[in-house]
Image (tube, helix red, strand yellow):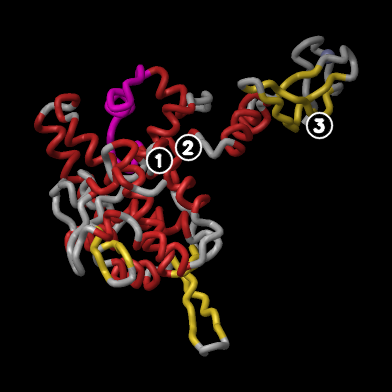
Amino acid sequence: MEKRCPICETEGTITKIKMEEDIDIRGEKIHVEYNSFKCSACEEIILESTPENDPLNIAYRKYREIHNMLQPEEIRDIRRKYGITQSELARILGLGGATLSRYENGGLQDKAYDSQLKLISDPRNMLRIVRDNSELFGEKRSNLLISQLKKIAKDEYPLERCMEELFGSDERSVFTGYQVLNIDKILNCILYFCKDGLLKTKINKYLFYADFKHFKEYKLGITGVNYVHLPHGPVPNNYDIYLSTFLKNGYLEIEEIFYPDPNIVGEKYISKEKSMLYTFSDSEILVLSTVKEFFKAFTAKAISDYSHKEKAYQETADQELISYEFAEYLAF
Ligand SMILES: [Zn+2]
């Protein structure tokens, strides 16, 4: 079909051309390629008005990809999954309704809102938020949302759910680092630590140091786990059940390492999924990486010896729960 140039109105002079340019997005040069039209009579370039060929839209999508941010359709999907309106979600986020609508239709979201949206894409977080902010919805609506969210959470996280029911209580005490047991955080700590493979002994010590180090600095643990004094050091209560369940559900795999003399086998745990770091706060991520870095060069024996010198270990008896208050005396 012959097209008429919208600028000079000559017929049959428009051809499709490939364009490329660098667009500045938040101080970053983003290279984009797209189709547009050129008129051979007036030499004008006419942009195609589809989102796939809108350079700014392409640049935004690319920018989000680079920065691991949600795309507009993902934002919309989160909202639809929960069956809430734009204005309800906007209220939760403390945003204007127009702003959220812009995000869902291609506007580039602020980094802070992006993090919040990722957080609530997990129905368990959304559930907590709705529970804590029922006044935003009114009693009837919030009760309905809560029961829907419970169902969604159960469907999406059957494993974590049933483990929390088995081991968890809502109790926060000096033995849980004043946190409620959070299986999702335990899993993501382990996925983070085992990215390149880690021996079981080291996983347990890394968890201990992460929780206690965070408590030392911020008066709060990370995972809500109880730690027990066992002969080989402080270890998370039920650690063998966590590890075997994560293994069975495909989050981890084991690589066997043979030590020829005296003929023993070590088991290295390797993550099969990426750790969802947005599960954690900034201070938690900082502590996780500090612990990983600090013990990187330690052998399993060295880290075990190191933990035996902790007051948390020396001043507790076999099988005894370890109070997070010992964190104060942590060696690093
Ligand atoms: Zn023209």
Q: Which residue is mark 1?
A: 77
Point 40% across, 24% down: residue:
100
- Could you tell me which secondary element the residue under label 2 belongs to? helix
Q: Is residue 271 visible?
A: yes
Q: Amino acid at mark 1?
A: Asp
Q: Which residues are magenta?
A: 79-97
For label 1, count other residues whose C-alpha is less than 10 Å away and answer few (under 14), some (14-19) or many (20+): some
Query: On residue 18, which mark appears?
Result: 3
- Closer mark to the observer between disc 3 and disc 1: 1
Q: Are marks 1 and 2 in contact (CB under 8 Å)?
A: yes
Point 82% across, 14% down: residue:
44
Q: Amino acid at mark 2?
A: Glu
Q: Is residue 233 left or right of residue 264?
A: left
| Quarter residue 208 falls in | bottom left
Camera-side residue of 184 and 14? 184
Residue 30 image point, x, y percent: 70, 29
Camera-side residue of 176 and 121? 176
| Quarter residue 148 falls in | top left
